[in-house]
Amino acid sequence: MSLQIEMEHHRKALIVRLKGELDHHNAHLVKARMEEAIEKGDSSHIILSMKDLDFMDSSGLGVILGRYKQITGKGGKMVVCDINPAIYRLFEMSGFFKILTIQDNERLALSSLGVVS
Amino acid sequence: MNEANFMKLQFASKSENEAFARVTVAAFASQLDPTLDELTDIKTVVSEAVTNAIIHGYDNRGDGVITISAEIANDTLYLTVEDQGRGIEDLEQAKQPLYTSKPELERSGMGFTIIENFMDQLEVISSPGKGTLLTMSKRIESKKALYN
């Protein structure tokens, strides 16, 4: 039921992998960890991998939108990958596809940002 | 015709209970043999309603009480989520997609929109200073064949 946040810097991209369930209870943790990594690190872009995210509600949408604004405010990009059908529907309903780039997996996300090793 | 089955759940307005509430309601709803998508819809709706009660109803205080009741009648799940919090002053505004009364908290403003989309029916009764009652229902598709 809990949430794990895994982060890895890869070239100019910060890869964030969310595992478990993202809701109001733990959204502030995602916010705090990502905010810090964006401010301290030298990553220009964010790749948000949702491969092992089993559940997300609108609190997740809020925190993703917040980080999107943060990284684009610094001139970077945000790519979301490996989203399951349930989360896809939430994104669709909220109009997120108008602003977010979606890729099937991390490898494609990295190559779309031009930061493949 | 089966007799209706029901359950009632009461818990403190703490965010730790959001997962507890959605998993419990989903476990109860499993009796209707829902698809995985339907079950996710129900979990998401409960999560949205309980989160609203905690953040907006009780202003993130943990000393409030949230009551959920669920009933299964034939192929339909009836659900209520109730709080005795501050209530909603402008319901039409609250239901607008992307509207949030607490932008400083990074809320997406999608709670009501998600509930309306994932359930077949939603009724909201709210009185400022007294609380909010959500009444919802969802027909579980996978059992339709049995009752048609």
Image (cartoon, coloured by chain):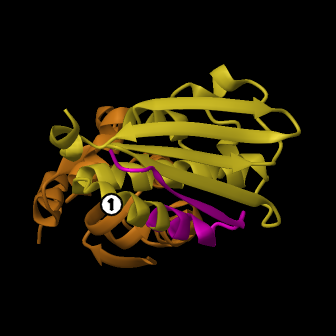
Chain colours: A orange, B yellow
Q: How many marks?
A: 1
Picture coordinates of residue A15, whole percent (x, y) = 30, 69
Taking the magenta stretch, the answer to whether it contains residue B16 is yes
Task: Give the left or right position of residue A82, taking residue A56 as reference.
Answer: left
The quadrant of the rendering that contains the N terminus of chain A is bottom left
Check the image and report above or below for A45 versus B83. Answer: below
Label 1 belongs to which residue?
B31
Which region is colored magenta? B1-23
Q: Nearer the viewer, residue A63 or B30?
A: B30
Residue A44 visible in the current orientation = no
Q: Nearer the viewer, residue B124 or A50?
A: B124
> Element under label 1?
helix
Q: Residue at x 45, y 38 (%)?
A: B137
Picture coordinates of residue B39, whole percent (x, y) = 32, 55
Q: Residue furthest top?
A: B92
Task: Give the left or right position of residue A34, taking residue B60 as reference.
Answer: left
Check the image and report above or below for A36 versus B76. Answer: below
Task: Give the left or right position of residue B6, taking residue B38 as reference.
Answer: right
Residue B125 visible in the current orientation = yes
Picture coordinates of residue A95, whole percent (x, y) = 36, 32
Task: Give the left or right position of residue B7, taking residue B1 as reference.
Answer: right
Q: Tell me which chain the residue with mark 1 is part of.
A: B
Picture coordinates of residue B58, whole percent (x, y) = 79, 53
Q: Residue furthest right?
A: B129
Q: Residue at x 17, y 61 (%)?
A: A110
As shown in the figure, which amino acid type bears the numbered disc 1? Gln
Q: Residues within 10 Å of mark 1 (few under 14, many from 20)?
A: few
The quadrant of the rendering that contains the C terminus of chain A is bottom left
